[in-house]
Amino acid sequence: MGFSLACFMVQVCPPVSVSYSSCLPLSSVASTSSVPFSRDSNQKRSIAAIRFLKSYGLKTTIANVLMLQNMQDYPQVRELARELDVEFTIDPTITPKMDGDRAILNLNIEREALHRVFHDEQLVGDVEEFCRPAAAADEDEMDSLPCSAGHTACYVSPYGDVYPCVQFPLPTGNVRRQRFVDIWRDSEQMNEVRSIRMRDLPTCSGCGHMTGCTRCPGLAFMEGDMRGPSIQDCEKSFARTGIPSKNLTAKRPAGAVGLVQIQGVRIAVAGGISA
């Protein structure tokens, strides 16, 4: 987000959470006083915008997208957030493009690095508690919604296409041809998404990770079945607990010791980390 947009938001918005995606290698940023402004004007403008928003009382978050190129730098970015007195989140999930292109997944961090993130007590707090296996699902949890996509939020593309979520590329209508309210209320695709409950997921409903997994139906959809498991979230649960999911166990070749290559997970950190 640029400085000009930050100025506009201060004028029109009440206090809200504003994320700054930071995927630049910031290994040299040990403190705000030593930020190499002359080396990176974008970084300078971002920090100036954060300070500007803070001065007007807007809650601000630095979001650090982890990838192979900057995996080693998140402690410094976290320290920068601490010195600026703003929240900090990390997200090590690189997702496929909306057109289904998966080549970008090559930027995802390796399994060992992901394991270290999940076991960093400065992020998760009590590592043993955070990495504890999930409890068994009860009837209420079996009847719960898999995700809020299509229920409380949706995504409208620049071309007017409406999707259940920015990460769920199932077309449900187009606001250039239909009223949004008609799409929201009457779209066959949107209502199909809304009809799904946890017990309707043939693999995940029988998995021991169900109550602790952050399964994304959009990622599952891009992998072929919105009611199926998302391999990236299965791998996240494995990295966190060390226990393979039902899906990973099924995909493991007979006699194999290792599991499939981890391709990324999503983590939200704000004074900690949430699975």
Image (tube, rainbow, N blue to C red):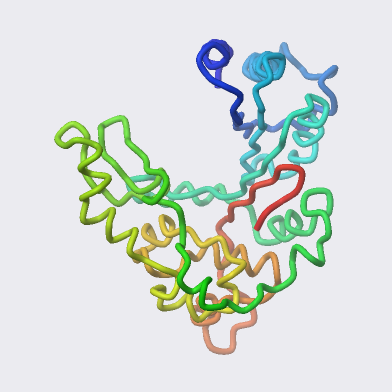
Residue nearer the viewer, 141 or 275 = 141
Q: Does 124 appear above or below 139?
A: above
273 vs 79: above or below: below
Percent x, y for residue 116?
Answer: 76, 57
Determine which quarter of the picture holds residue 77: top right
Please give the name of the residue rendered at 48% of the width and 49% of the height, measured from the top-left corner: 95
Q: Residue at x 25, y 33 (%)?
A: 160
Name the residue rendered at 39%, 74% in the picture: 200
Q: Count the marks.
A: 0
Q: Quadrant of the C terminus?
A: bottom right
Q: Is residue 40 left or right of residue 225?
A: right
In this picture, residue 177 sits left or right of residue 219: left
Q: Residue at x 62, y 34 (%)?
A: 23
- Quadrant for the N terminus in the image: top right
In this view, the residue farthest toward the left is 177
| Extreme-front residue of the structure | 140
